[in-house]
Amino acid sequence: MTYLHPKYQLLKIDGVKQVDAAEAFALVQTGNALLIDIREPYKYEEGIPDIKSGMKQLPMSDTSKLLKLPESGVTLIMLCAHGIRSIQWTSWLTQHG
């Protein structure tokens, strides 16, 4: 069986908007959003977004850095390879402020 979109991308979290790559890029370009690449370094070989500013690489395994993300009005966009880790981390952030 083949899916056009992986099933896990259909998960919904109250108060969290899912965006595609084009919308994420546009949001970062406005300066009002920060793209957080939470993939582990070995996953970078799959490609890294070509964004000059507005992006941080903070592996999910390094939670100490992830917990120090800005609390300002900046929109945070979580990026991972397939959406599972970004959904998990976004869910945790939503639950813990």
Image (spheres, rainbow, N blue to C red):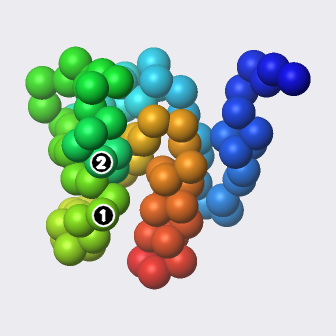
The x and y percentages for residue 46 are 34, 24
Q: Which residue sits furthest left?
A: 52
**Residue that numbered label 2 is attached to:** 40
Q: Residues within 10 Å of mark 1 (few under 14, many from 20)?
A: few
Q: Earlier in the sequence, mark 2 or mark 1?
A: 2
Residue appearing at x 13%, y 31% in the figure:
53
Residue 74 appears in the rendering: no
Q: Residues within 10 Å of mark 2 (few under 14, many from 20)?
A: some
Residue 44 appears in the rendering: yes
Q: Which mark is residue 61?
A: 1
The x and y percentages for residue 70 are 21, 63
Which quarter of the figure is the C terminus placed in?
Answer: bottom left
Quarter occupied by residue 10: top right
- Please tell me whether mark 1 sits on a helix, a strand or a loop: loop
Q: Is residue 66 left or right of residue 9?
A: left
The x and y percentages for residue 28 are 29, 32
Q: Nearer the viewer, residue 32 or 14?
A: 14
Q: Nearer the viewer, residue 70 or 73?
A: 70
Q: Are marks 2 and 1 in contact (CB under 8 Å)?
A: yes
Position of 34 relative to 65 (above/below):
above
Which quarter of the figure is the N terminus placed in?
Answer: top right
Position of 88 relative to 75 (above/below):
below
Amino acid on which the number 2 mark rests in the picture:
Glu
Q: Nearer the viewer, residue 46 or 66?
A: 46
Q: Is residue 66 left or right of residue 88?
A: left
